[in-house]
Image (cartoon, grey):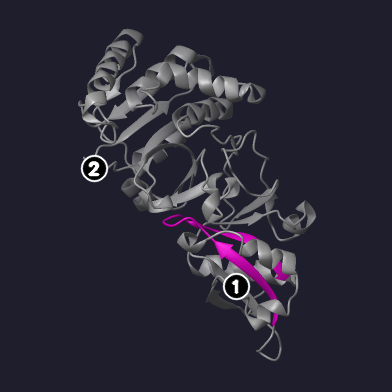
Amino acid sequence: MPSPQEPSVRSVVVPFEAGEPSAPLRRLGHHEVLERWQAVDRSTHAPHLVGVPGADGEDWTAAALVTARPHTAYLKIVDAVGDVPAAVAAVVAHARARELVQVKWEGWTATPEEAAAAGFASLSPPLARSEDAGGPAAGYFRWLDDSVVTEPPYYGQTTHFTCGAVTALVAQAHAGSLPRNALDRRAELTLWRDATNFPACEPVGLGVAVRRAWPSSPVTVHLDTDRPVMLDHHPESEREWRAHLQHMSREDAGRTGVPIDPRRLSATEIRSAIGRREHVLLLLSLAAMQGFDVPHWVLCHGVVPGAVVIDDPWADAAKGDTWIDAHLLPVADPSLDTMANISPDGFGGAVAIGRPAVDRR
């Protein structure tokens, strides 16, 4: 049901198809916006148009291009044309009807004032962006149930292999254990160098590196297997020495007091950890969200009804995926549990970072 501040808006929802825009869309003008909509292949993010029909039922008075990462709990307005407030209100109603928890809005043409008038808050601009990342300089978001989630800084990994280090740094910046202005490429590469299993960061090595960098922060590694992990894509000749490094990481964990819990963290347990003001670095597969089964680290830092809020340090610009998708990203609990099952052998890994000893209150 729309809230008293959101009158019911008639709308038409149709798939967005590459090629010549439909007649109702063309008549709205804004050809530079329509060209940008066609500039990348958004097909894997379920692109669709939410149009507001005019009084004659034929022409539209407004339209918005809407996308979202698969298996998530939000919609993103790429842009709106025509009567923009009406288009945005129609998208919000559309998201509510789908029982989603959030709507985002890329700031290609929208101003902070227009966004605020529609009930959206500004996202803090990214401190860094992934290599070849696209997207506008500004973005906006709105929780549909008035949830409050404290926003961490957004930092896009600057290499293809530093996601683990970035999630740890963002977690510590969000917790107040690292100044935000210290979150830079030098810090990214320094922590990665201490945690890497060449080139990826496996759970035990990452947990040990976090404990070394912040000795006062309690760290627990969750890994439900005692065998080496994340080696399957390497040639057989290169697995042995990487496996040996992982055994060394387990020895380091014993010496530095980092416990290794042999249980996989469920979404329910991640919720409990966040409720204790912990941060969870979660290893998940990108198969559901991006279409390729690659292990990838994300930060779990907030909760809303039905979903865990993550920050993903990587976005796939080739699909129209931007930092606005990756930042404050809600994922429904069952979807998160599925993503955290890492193929081909089905293991789960996470690193939980607690509050520093001086902040136990």
**Residue drawn at 74 percent across, 72 percent down:** 82
Can I make out residue 350 in this image? yes
Q: How many marks?
A: 2
Could you give the CA–CA distance between mark 2 and mark 1, rounded to whole angstroms?
Answer: 39 Å
Farthest residue, direction bottom: 56
Residue 180 quadrant: top right
**Residue drawn at 67 percent across, 70 percent down:** 87
Of helix, strand and loop, which one carries label 2? loop
Mark 2: few/some/many CA within 10 Å (<14, 14-19, 20+): few
Q: Which numbered disc covers residue 50? A: 1
Q: Position of residue 321 (x, y in %)?
A: 54, 52
Q: Nearer the viewer, mark 2 or mark 1?
A: 2
Of helix, strand and loop, which one carries label 1? strand
Vertical arrangement, residue 354 with respect to residue 194, above or below: below
Range of residues picked out in magenta: 60-81
Vertical arrangement, residue 118 with respect to residue 298, above or below: below
Residue 200 quadrant: top left
**Front in this rendered view, residue 119 or 18:** 18
Q: Amino acid at mark 1?
A: Val
Residue corresponding to mark 2: 344
In the image: residue 343, left or right of residue 284: left
Q: Position of residue 273 (x, y in %)?
A: 41, 33
- Check the picture and name the quadrant holding the N terminus: bottom right
Q: Which numbered disc covers residue 346? A: none
Can I make out residue 176 in this image? no
Q: Is 181 contained in the magenta span?
A: no
Main structural element of the magenta stretch: helix, strand or loop?
strand
Q: Amino acid at mark 2?
A: Pro
**Front in this rendered view, residue 279 or 286:** 286
Q: Position of residue 336 (x, y in %)?
A: 37, 47
Q: Is 65 contained in the magenta span?
A: yes
**Front in this rendered view, residue 167 or 44:** 44
